Amino acid sequence: MHPVRKQRLYLVLFIALFSSIAVGLVVYALRGNINLFYPPAEVAAGKAPTGQPIRVGGMVLEDSLQRAPDSLAIRFKLTDYEAAVDVVYVGILPDLFAEGQGAVASGVLNEEGVLEATEILAKHDENYMPPEVTHALENSAYDEKGNAK
Amino acid sequence: MWPIFHKFGSPPWLYAIAGAILRWLLPITLLALVTGMVWGLLFTPSENVQGNSYRIIYIHVPAAVVALAGYYVMALAGAVSLIWRMKMADVAMKAAAPVGAALTFVALFTGAIWGKPTWGTWWVWDARITSMLILLFLYLGVVALYEAFDNKEAAGKACAVLSLVGMVNIPIIYKSVDWWYSLHQGASIKFTGETSIHPSMLYPLLLMIAAFYALFTCALLLNMRAELLQREQRTQWVQKLLSKDVVN
Amino acid sequence: MYFDSLHAALDMGGHGFYVWTAYSVTIVMIALVVIAPVLRRRRFLRQLAGQLKRAQVATAENTRGER
């Protein structure tokens, strides 16, 4: 290769390498802040601050959802199967919010460790199935990977 | 290998070959896009959890995938033009930027619309979504930077450096949902491991991804032809092309 | 077809507005991405052809003038 071109090639590699390192360091420094939410285990371990707005994300624990009979107030538990966080919320829920589904609640953690949420977002997974297939799988003795249940 | 490489450096050859490719690729692309959209909208089953709103996947995922791949095309063209001072690589880099910006915009816009009925919000400052917004600014930055220079050679160099620096963002976008806790779900089509999307939904999605790749190629070639003509307007081959056009 | 009627396809179980808006905007953007460079190239060809014609007329007049 021509020496001038070789020099330019090194320049290009230098740009790519050093911008990667710079961005890598920024991302590393901000690693906590880039996370959209705390998992319940970190909240239980006391890593999440109380008294300031945070987000907690996880699965809505089965049979934990309680609705107030006369208002839109609800109470449920968010879990990552290691720990669970109680969440209270008043308002309209997204359509996809359901027990056993993912959700992200934003609000303030009070002294009792209960998240007083001001917004609930539903989180869904990367599985896409037609309803008939899902129902068939539920009734079948095998799961979608063909293993016996 | 090298003769082909040198041919790519020849504007009239590139102009002619791009025209020849477009003559059959453009109709096929449009046909594939229409087929994929109709298939996805009307002939696939609804989704168990999301209902019919999931049909946005057939434009959202292909636009996002090709917006990321298109950035590599732009940055690679930028590197070639920096190292070998190849004019046609500079043309390709400049041509890729607006197409990539349009695709990134489509991915962000359809994602926002999809987010409302599923997540319950149009927008959230999530790692995946924010890094995708940075991608849009990088593409638009290349377009704007090119226009900002009077000296086009300097413009090409500056844009090449910008697109190379911005390349770090691509793996970040790709891995953001694995590295951080994010509202955005992970990839459904995996290169390793099980694909978690039912075949009846996967095939139209694959068709749409192929169609968007073809669309990117078509738009890139169309932009390159327009750019070539403008840059080479005083050369003999353009004059010859014109006299042929004027006579006909 | 998955839907029973045109109305059902437009409504999409209540998600029609979202789905059809997303597709409409995408189609507009695809059209823009394809048509913009075609128009740009055509404009140039016309412009250059005009220049060429004027140049030809000018040379023709010059040669007449020299006689």
Image (tube, rainbow, N blue to C red):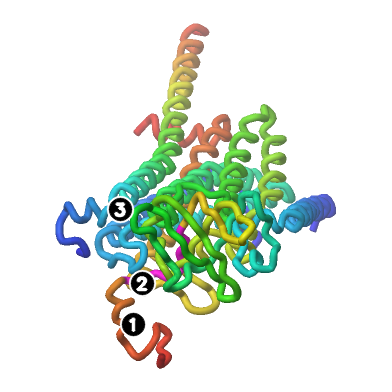
Query: According to the image, label 2 marks what residue?
Result: A129
Q: Which residues are magenta?
A: A122-130
- Could you give the CA–CA distance between mark 3 and mark 2, rounded to whole angstroms? 18 Å
Find residue C39 and report its horizontal and vertical position in percent.
41, 34
State the residue at coordinates (66%, 60%): B2
- Image quarter of residue B197: bottom left
State the residue at coordinates (30%, 72%): A131
Q: Amino acid at mark 2?
A: Met
Find residue B40 and report its horizontal and vertical position in percent.
31, 61
For the residues beneath circles 3 and 1, the answer to whether they share a chain is: no
Q: Secondary structure at mark 2?
A: loop
On the rendered image, what quadrant is the C terminus of chain A found in?
A: bottom left
- Could you give the CA–CA distance between mark 2 and mark 1, rounded to whole angstroms? 10 Å
- Magenta span has A125? yes
- Could you give the CA–CA distance between mark 3 and mark 1, rounded to whole angstroms? 26 Å
Q: Which of label 2 and label 1 is nearer to you? A: 1
Q: Nearer the viewer, residue B37 or B74?
A: B37
| Left or right of residue B125, residue C46 in this image | left
Q: Which mark is residue A137?
A: 1
Q: Amino acid at mark 1?
A: Leu
Q: Work out whether residue B79 can be spotted.
A: yes
Q: Which mark is residue A31?
A: none
Find residue C66 and report its horizontal and vertical position in percent.
52, 8
State the residue at coordinates (50%, 63%): B185
